Amino acid sequence: MGVTEEEHKKKLLPPAEKNAKIAVILNQLRKDSPQEVTQDEVVAEVTKRFALQGHELDDKWDEMIRQTFVPGSQNYEEVKQNLEYSKLVDSFFAPAK
């Protein structure tokens, strides 16, 4: 027996609302407490992702990554934003200074 569209919406709505609220809160926290992310950190993250996919990385890969993931490009900004969120969340659990 199938699920109606209405039942499907009822099931998906609460987690979607929760995820939207979390995104709004994290975005505001990121604005209120900016996290510095360098180009080297972005390149390191992209390199890590490629390595996890099984790519053998060499100097040619590093140069290609640095040419593709330049500040201001959509690819770069997406990775940078993800790293900013990660640093922000990590800061919640860091010992107080």
Image: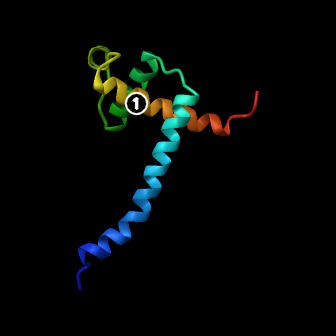
60 relative position to 24: left or right: left
Instruction: Identify the element where label 1 is drawn.
Output: helix
Q: Quadrant of residue 92?
A: top right
Give the residue furthest to the right.
97
Of 71 and 6, the residue lying toward us: 6
Residue 90 picture location, percent across and down: 60, 36
96 relative position to 27: left or right: right
Question: Callout 1, which amino acid?
Answer: Lys
Q: Quadrant of the image for the C terminus?
A: top right
Q: Quadrant of residue 66?
A: top left
How many C-alpha atoms fall within 10 Å of the one at disc 1: few (<14), some, or many (≥20)?
some
Q: Is residue 3 above or below residue 20?
A: below
Q: Is residue 66 above or below residue 52?
A: above
Q: Quadrant of the image for the N terminus?
A: bottom left
Q: Residue at x 49, y 30 (%)?
A: 84
Residue 13 picture location, percent across and down: 38, 64
> For mark 1, what is the residue?
48
Q: Residue at x 49, y 21 (%)?
A: 37
74 relative position to 84: left or right: left
Q: Quadrant of residue 29?
A: top right
Q: Residue at x 40, y 30 (%)?
A: 48
Residue 87 picture location, percent across and down: 55, 31
Q: Residue at x 35, y 16 (%)?
A: 71
